[in-house]
Amino acid sequence: MDTTASGDARALPRLPSLLSLLALLVVGLATVLLPAAATPLGPDAADEVFSAGRAATHIEAVSAEPRVLGSPAHRAAREYLVGELEELGWRTSVKSGVGWFSPQDGTTQRGARVHNIVALLPGTDPTGTVVLAAHYDTVRGSPGAGDDGIGIGTVLESARAITAGPPPRNDIMVLLTDGEEDGLLGADMFTSTRSPSLGPTVVLNHEARGNSGAPVTFRISDPNGALIEALAGAPDASADSLTQLGFELLPNDTDFKHFDNAGFHAYDTAISRGSAFYHSPLDTPDRLSHESLQQMGEIALATAHSLIDADLTELDSGGEKVVTTTPWGLLYYARWVEVALTALFFVAVGWLVIARIRRAEASIWSVAAAAGVSVATVGATALAAWLPWWLAQRLAPGMASPVVSEPYRPGMYELAAVVAALGVLITAYLWARKHLSAGSLVVGAFVLIAVVAAVALPFSGAASALVLPALPALVGMHVARFVVDRPPLPVVAVAIGSIPAAVLLVPAVVLSFDAGLMFGAPLAGVFVAVLFVLTLTLWEAVLPSSRTSVGIASVTRVAGTATLASVLVCALVAGFLNRDGATEPRQEHLWYALNSDLDTAVWASPDSPRSEWSRELLIDQASPLPVEFPWRDEQMAHGPAPVAPLQAPEVEVLDDTSAGGARELRLRLSSPRGANAVGLWVDSTTATVHGATVDGHRAEPAENFGFRFWGAGPEGVEVTLTLSVLEDRVGLRIIDLSDDLSVVPGYEPPTDRVVVAPTVVVARSLRI
């Protein structure tokens, strides 16, 4: 045991420490709650400003129904958008071609005939091009008012406001890409066929993963210095280098990927609250936050104004900067500053270790043990924050949206995550105090932060997320040691040093939940742990220690029990608020597949059944369905379905030649029933694909070759395959895909449910 008396003797007074913790909490919450949301402006706002009222008219016009590639609604939206841009007087055109996506894991490739909308306002003396970008297609079954109606509204209203102002110096382009939802296909085509006349180009891309919340610029291309300076002038702009690192660890992506890879300068800005509505039939204009729309528009317009009169040839010389958001705006500095601050923090932690050891408040071994305890505690904290929602989904899976596993009302689950995290921290601290001195625990925790910051230093912004709040807190602790004999100055020093931690980390906890409960809750738990560590000197004075008359083991049990009870209360309230019938309609996946070879059909879902309605349809044990859904290897819940009178996709052999052991097939795939997409897969036991073109676009050869192609139209799509044949006849699997389940006899949509990504597949096989 290392419970050195001097470690307790130097503890701060309890009441001032408690008041300081409460004050820090108030300061942190104030940074979250006090900033007012943008006030939506109506259609009568001044011409030169952004108006959510005017932008909303565009969203309503295109979001009456899903804009799936090749659908009538998709075509109507394109015609509307072209008309609006032409009315503004911009040089408007539709650039058509093939976009393609080849996954690196060799799974089914995706392509489409895409139709990008491009409009240009020439500058008076251009040094390059500023592009306002969004995508106008949607997933199946979603009207897409958020994804990406908010981007459409932002871009069109910003373009109108720019037109109303003085002529810009640089060229301004509106780019509304197509096919984003099925593999960033329009952006792929745009960047691969871009005109050299664009010159230096900066793209402001706008996205959504929900229907509300503050827009966050979560990715900026490198070098980012000049771009951050332009963004910093926008009202309520939010950006953080850490979000870029976090997003790149996720499987999601946006058109930004192609803009960045093409060498463009680019921003990626999105809203992400209300993610339960994402990619669902409930992503409608009436549910989209006009406050979020106004704020996104103001940021886009202000940033564009900063760039349209700038010398875009200087963007490459802006250098690399680290950025984070504070209550007074963006804080940004050169990358070398992050390195210097991290080194300074490392030195300050070393000084803390030496000082505590010299005063016999800790030892090398106790500090090492405390650092190990800190590692375990942070892991347990993240797990505890994640558990409430995970358990809720096990008990009531219908509460979670099937796309991102979010409830409609996540607030109480978020509170449960924070309470669980804080409870684990307090309980772990009380347990550790039985074995280690307070001095050892403080030093060990700071050593862990220093080590993590050093390890994270190669990743821009990662170290700053720890060092910016931790360095002032550490300085406050050092100052407190020098004024220890002059109360209440030690408490004041520690409290003042902890203010940056409250200002930066409380908003970080809240913002973490924008990533969703499954990913955001454990991240929020980590930020709670860091904030707890940085204020541990105050907690040390407030919580019972080895000097108290009450047994610390008893207090630990009480703390653990109180935490569990609090979390349960939060979870019960959250469950009540999200109960069936108390929220928007719950969501279900439902797919239908007709096997035209056997004249059989199945209902299927990539999820387990979530209601009595789906359980009556999906009665068979989950298993892969490669015949009906050849692009999926995962298990699917399924059950027998009525056979719909649907025509099978057709294959016409246009040419068939063999030479030198290779065979070349030229085929035309088409859908007599006018489905949105067609697909083809080659049976790898009969042939290996060494070369392929689809609608003139070169696809990646693969041992297990297959693709889906959208927007082929009534004429279909031409496919050329170069094969090495393993059998006399090549086996092919053909499908077409649409999204109208009403074609199935007897199908009755549930009155209290909405179907996400409705899918109708007709499949056939043949040997050629």
Image (cartoon, helix red, strand yellow):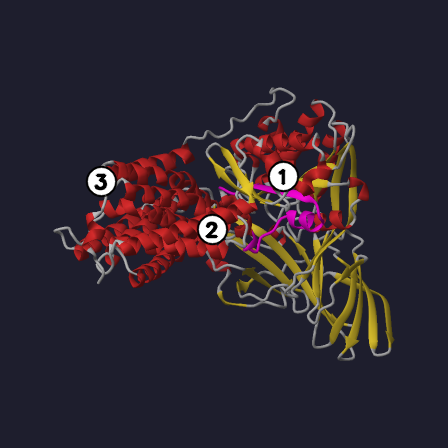
Query: x, y percentage for residue 741?
Result: 60, 52
- Closest to the camera, between mark 1 and mark 2, is 2
> Residue 2 in the image: x percent, y percent?
23, 60
The one of 448 and 120 positioned closer to us in this rendering: 448
Along the line of sight, the residue nearer the viewer: 441 or 626: 441
- Residue 263 is inside the magenta segment: yes
Q: Which residue is mark 3?
A: 485
| Of 737 and 298, the residue lying toward us | 298
Near-viewer residue (656 or 54): 54
Q: Amino acid at mark 1?
A: Leu
Identify the image quadrant of residue 487.
Answer: top left
The N terminus lies in quadrant: bottom left
Query: How far from the left and from the top, in percent, is residue 130?
Result: 71, 36
**In terms of secondary structure, where does tag 2 sit?**
helix
Name the residue located 69 percent from the left edge and 51 percent from the top edge: 261
Chain part drawn in magenta: 248-273
Q: CA distance from mark 1 to mark 3?
A: 49 Å
Q: Earlier in the sequence, mark 3 or mark 2?
A: 2
Q: Amino acid at mark 2?
A: Ala
Please state which amino acid type lies under the numbered disc 3.
Asp
Q: Which residue is mark 1?
A: 227
According to the image, label 2 marks what residue?
A: 343
